[in-house]
Amino acid sequence: MTRRVMRIFSPSIPVVTPGGPAPSDSKNAEALADSLEAQFQPVKNPSVPTAIEVVNEAMQATLLLPQVRVS
């Protein structure tokens, strides 16, 4: 009971879109999806070929490991 009385609630910050604050949950979801889509795009031209090579070698080594059965 004391925790409930002592808890201070802060309002959530509205999601701001290019057209202003998002007025509904569906607009919030759409704004979040657009933001994530803009941030996470596939890399077409890797800028660090040596890092790509290290990752490829690690993946090959993992694929060549014997499969361990868990019973």
Image (cartoon, helix red, strand yellow):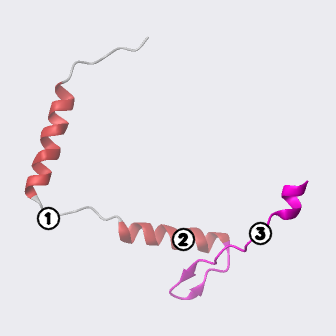
Q: Which region of the structure is painted magenta?
A: 1-24
Q: Nearer the viewer, mark 2 or mark 1?
A: 1
The number of numbered discs placed on residues in the rendered structure image is 3
Numbered circle sitting on residue 37? none
Of marks 3 and 1, the one in the foreground: 3
> Looking at the picture, which amino acid does disc 3 mark?
Phe
Crowd tier of the residue under label 2, counting other residues whose Cα lies within 10 Å: few below 14, some 14–19, many 20 or above: some
Kindly identify the amino acid type of the residue bearing the numbered disc 2. Answer: Glu
The CA distance from mark 3 to mark 1 is 47 Å
Q: Which mark is residue 45?
A: 1
Tell me which label, 2 or 3, sits earlier in the chain: 3
Q: Nearer the viewer, residue 38 or 6?
A: 6
Q: Are marks 3 and 1 in contact (CB under 8 Å)?
A: no
**Which of the pair 59/42 is nearer the observer?**
59
Q: Is residue 38 placed above or below 43 in the rendered structure?
A: below
Q: Secondary structure at mark 2?
A: helix
Q: Residue furthest bottom?
A: 19
Q: Residue at x 13, y 46 (%)?
A: 54
Residue at x-position 79% and y-position 68%:
8
Give the percent coordinates (x, y) of residue 67: 27, 18
**Image side of residue 37 versus residue 2, left or right:** left
Q: Position of residue 18 (x, y in %)?
A: 50, 87
Q: Which three-letter amino acid code belongs to the residue tagged 1?
A: Asn
